[in-house]
Amino acid sequence: MKAVILSGGSGQRLLPLTSKTTKQLLPIANKPTLFHILDRIKEETEIKSVVVVVSQDFGHQVKETLLNSEYSKYFSMDFVFQDQPLGLAHAVQITKGQVGDDSFLMFLGDILIEKGEVKKAVEKFSKDNFETTVFLNEVEDPRPYGVAEVDGERVLKLIEKPENPKSNLCLSGIYLFKPSIFFAIENIKPSFRGELEITDAVDFQIQKGKKVGYYKINGLWFDVGTPENMLLANQFLLSKIENEIESEVNDSVKIKGLVQIGKNVIIENSEITGPVIIADNTIIKDSKIGPNVSLASNIVIESSNIENSIIRDNSKIKNIEVTISDSIMGENVEINRTLKGKGDYILGDGIKCMSS
């Protein structure tokens, strides 16, 4: 079995965070979403070969990041460039040469899932001998998703974004396919959006009498395609961390809850309320950090309070009177000014907000 990860997409809902970085590389709990997906594959399957579909805009960025990561030592990686956003089924189809005659696990590159779910689904897929197994997730409003109608262990029908859904089971962006899916994709037509829909390909299999099953996700599932969902996923992953402090912390610092502190971190006269991750070479003075905060490396925070936020590398936050909350800041952001009112920010890379 192989894995296919779709890492294209423009990330419009995450602008300005995605103006210089593809959404799959944005960090959640100080680790890119793609890395979390590779962790699930590595820990819960025997897969050693991964095919990554990338866009023309950020494909080289994704390729360089993955090839320079620890995962390149474990996985054999192929990269396929999708020239145009012609749909998920098209993205799958262009991996045919790399996948060959193997079954494969397919992940959308902006999906996070709890530990254990992939392992159970792969075991079920092997046991039941389905052509396709779709991961389904119960949601309150399934209308924005592909929706499955099921009977027993079988999927009867898939409908993309129905106005009047007959089920609250939505497609989660994770699939298990036998190579017969390539034949199905070859026999569907573009939707009204001009795209080849993966729901149409799977529905083609159902109409031809192929066995299509499902795995219902029991734990939490996150589509991290919006700032709100990024922060929810960050909260969840931070709740799973273990205490690890690699820098000396003096008596002027109060720490409670789950905290990870990296190397060469300086903290003075501050309070850290976990869960919090603080990466290497960060300086925190006269501030309150947490709960639910991820600080990347080489950050400086002075006289400021931060909670429920993600702050990326090389940023500087100083002298903020309001509490920064529900915020995501890109790399090399600088804020140094007196502000009043609500302190929620979504700031892209290199933004400077300085007092006059």
Image (cartoon, grey):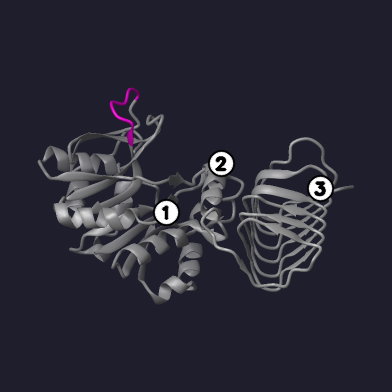
Left or right of 301, for residue 95: left
- Please state the total of marks drawn on the protein image: 3
Secondary structure state at the residue bearing disc 1 = loop
- Above/below status of 246 relative to 294: below
Residue drawn at 13 percent across, 37 percent down: 207
Q: Of all residues shown, which one is farthest toward the top?
A: 164
Q: Which mark is residue 320?
A: 3
Residue drawn at 51 percent across, 56 percent down: 240
According to the image, label 1 marks what residue? 109
Magenta region, residue range: 163-169
Label 1 crowd (10 A; few <14 / some 14-19 / many >=20) = many
According to the image, label 2 marks what residue? 228
Q: Residue 87, position in %: x, y?
A: 34, 45
Q: Give the camera-side residue of 354 and 228.
A: 228
Secondary structure state at the residue bearing disc 3 = loop
Measured in 3D between alpha carbons, the distance from the residue under mark 1 to the one under mark 2, in whole angstroms, is 17 Å
What is the quadrant of residue 312 in the picture?
Answer: bottom right
Closer to us: mark 1 or mark 2? Answer: 2
Magenta residues, dominant SS class: loop
Q: Residue 250, position in %: x, y?
A: 78, 68
Label 3 crowd (10 A; few <14 / some 14-19 / many >=20) = many
* Lower sequence index among marks 1 and 2: 1
* Residue 133 shows up from this direction: yes
| Amino acid, disc 2 | Glu
Measured in 3D between alpha carbons, the distance from the residue under mark 1 to the one under mark 3, in whole angstroms, is 35 Å
Asked whether 164 falls inside the magenta stretch, the response is: yes
* Residue 189 shows up from this direction: no
Label 2 crowd (10 A; few <14 / some 14-19 / many >=20) = some
| Amino acid, disc 3 | Ile
Secondary structure state at the residue bearing disc 2 = helix
